[in-house]
Image (cartoon, rainbow, N blue to C red):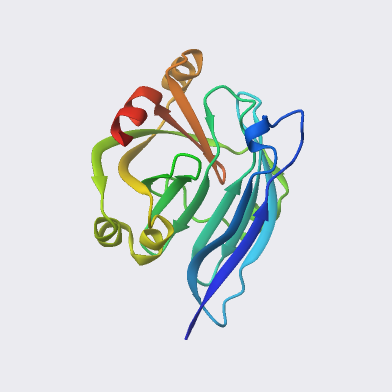
Amino acid sequence: MLRLLCIKITLDNDADNLNLKTKTMIIGLVTLLLVSVGASPEVNHLVEIDHQGCTVAMDVIHDSRAKTVLAIVGDVSKYKNGIQTVNFHDYNTGYGALKDINKQTCVITKSPVPMGTDKQYRVGITTEVHDHVLNLVPRKLTYDDVKTLAGPKVATFCKDYTSLYADITKANKQKRDADDAGSSMSYMWCVISRCIVNTSAFDTAMG
């Protein structure tokens, strides 16, 4: 027997950090995750500080029993080329998705880090942030494509969104520093992870 887990999230309304368009952004009713009645999702607030000193806040809803994680990332507009996302990982299939609500896009990829322990999600603040590079495959995926690749939960999460697959690799220090020095890269954060993607390639692929 299944039920829908619906989470209503209101993002930070700090006038110093948000532009007029996004001051009162509300990610309303993030309707997700088919979970069993007996499961007990846990919500924690997590702040990450990456190697550049970027401080990124997020709410993390993890379900150890269902092996799923939902991360709702706070405002990152103060960071150059930062992309605010809502991310979902299904560790049963090993795939996840980074969703940009403003642009209605979903990037599907292998989950770059294993599902964390309860302690990692409850720690409150962490400097453990692993960098990864996303290499987009320029072909849009249908709902059925996503379902076949990543499972029905990821497909439901990305329904009604333009979806692409991306190969993901760990960024070595030399590559990471070169990307950080340039202006052609965009950045997306998730739980103990930061993803780097070529901005022009991303825009071209999304059409």
What is the count of numbered marks? 0
Q: Residue at x 57, y 51 (%)?
A: 71
Which quadrant is home to the C terminus? top left
Q: Residue at x 32, y 36 (%)?
A: 206
Q: Residue at x 47, y 27 (%)?
A: 186
Picture coordinates of residue 175, whole percent (x, y): 41, 20
What is the residue that sits farthest to the front in this orientation? 21
Picture coordinates of residue 37, whole percent (x, y): 55, 82
Picture coordinates of residue 127, whole percent (x, y): 65, 36
Q: Is residue 133 above or below residue 70?
A: above
Q: Dividing the picture into quarters, in which one does residue 151 lie?
A: bottom left
Q: Residue at x 38, y 54 (%)?
A: 160
Q: Nearer the viewer, residue 205 or 192?
A: 205
What is the residue that sits farthest to the bottom in this orientation? 1
Is 154 on the left-hand or right-hand side of 3? Answer: left
Q: Is residue 128 above or below residue 123?
A: above
Is 16 on the left-hand or right-hand side of 81? Answer: right
Picture coordinates of residue 183, whole percent (x, y): 47, 15
